[in-house]
Image (spheres, grey):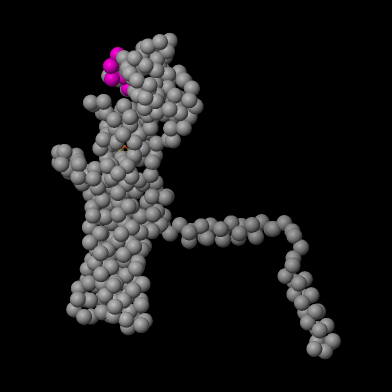
Amino acid sequence: MRSTDCTTWIGLLYVIGIVSVQPARCRSEKEQLMTLQNRTETAGTQEIFPQIEARIDAIPGYKEASQQIADTIHSAVLDGGPAARNAADLLHGTWLGHPLHPVLTDIPIGSWTLAALFDGLEAVTGNHYAGRVADTLIGVGAAAAVPTALAGIADYSAIKQDSTSLAAAHGALNSVGLGLYLLSLNERRRGRRGRGRLFGALAFGLVTLSAGMGGDLVYRKRVGVNHAPEPAGPTEWIDALSLNELQIGAARRVDVEGEAVLLYRPDANLVRAISAICNHAGGPLEEGNFKNGCVECPWHQSVFDLSDGHAVHGPATMPQPTYATRVRNGQIQVQLGRGAEYFESLGNVRTRTIGE
Ligand code: FES
């Protein structure tokens, strides 16, 4: 390269450097406004599910109808006697200590995702073995979708009111997706593999969008997560209430160092303490029904055993935090950092609770 060429290139790079490297300066008001606007627009694109929710909520009558359907199913469960209640508990996952629906969703989503890959392989390579694998996976996913949907319907029947419309749309999309998969299987059985793959691809798109909505229900709307506080406080006795202020058979919600604690006195010699915030969706347990050593949440009728907090009936699936209690100098005292089992482990809970 000649020296004149080198000089030209160096000069050009220098000019580019000067133009591109601007000295630091304060932005004008107009520039700041534009940055803010850009950020708002970017945030908007990140909030796809809130936007979907806003649009479906704007459909006249949709929100009310989705709530009405949920209420009808929930009433049928409550009025259906022990068999209906036990079936609902099974579907909620109360026996598992964890919501059942998200556990089951892995099977259809996993099967259908693999089916999409094998369908793609068949379409590209013409490998019929890949096509047969896709057919089988679609069938497995469709079979698993039935109990998955039933568990989802059970959860939907007792969902928080602000989540009903999105949950209904999630269920509707999944139903359409399942219908398309069944059509796809039918086409494949008749030898029309191209149409079968097309229906499969459409179904996969719908159920993928729906799976995103399901995730949004959990992570943004907090459906199915534990709403009760962590039982992690000091392991010291803290005065909660005078014993005289808690009649036998009565319940009181008290604030103990910022924690909402429900005190219940089933008889003269015993005081139970449990978190007053229902772990299912945050319902106020002090407004519930107290019967047979249990409290029934006023919002969706979960039932918790007051002695150890375990969920007797759903929709709650997790145990309710309990607190150790005792009475000293006429004061009911609790330990936020220890559950009721602390006293159970010490022996006779009654003499330990009331007595000096
Ligand atoms: S908030 Fe739903 S059962 Fe308590």
Q: Position of residue 12 (x, y in %)?
A: 77, 79
* Residue at the far bottom in the pictured view: 2
Q: Position of residue 277 (x, y in %)?
A: 37, 33
Prevailing secondary structure class for the magenta stretch in the rendered image = strand
Relative vertical location of residue 112 with respect to residue 53 in this rendering, above or below: below
Q: Quadrant of residue 111?
A: bottom left
Residue 189 in magenta stretch = no
Q: How many marks?
A: 0
Identify which residue, 207 or 28, lies in the foreground.
207
Residue drawn at the location 43% of the way across and 10% of the way down: 329
Whether residue 132 can be seen here: yes
Taking the image as shown, residue 247 lies to the left or right of residue 189, namely right
Taking the image as shown, residue 44 lies to the left or right of residue 247, namely right
Residue drawn at the location 48% of the way across and 61% of the way down: 45
- Residue range (magenta): 264-268
Q: Position of residue 170 (x, y in %)?
A: 31, 57
Residue drawn at the location 22% of the way across and 72% of the way down: 185
Relative vertical location of residue 279 with respect to residue 129 in this rendering, above or below: above
Taking the image as shown, residue 162 lies to the left or right of residue 175, namely right
Q: Quadrant of the N terminus?
A: bottom right
Relative vertical location of residue 163 with respect to residue 81 in this rendering, above or below: below
Q: Quadrant of residue 136?
A: bottom left
Q: Position of residue 26 (x, y in %)?
A: 72, 56
Whether residue 54 can be seen here: no
Identify which residue, 350 or 281, lies in the foreground.
350
Identify which residue, 223 or 107, lies in the foreground.
107
Quarter of the picture for ligand 1?
top left
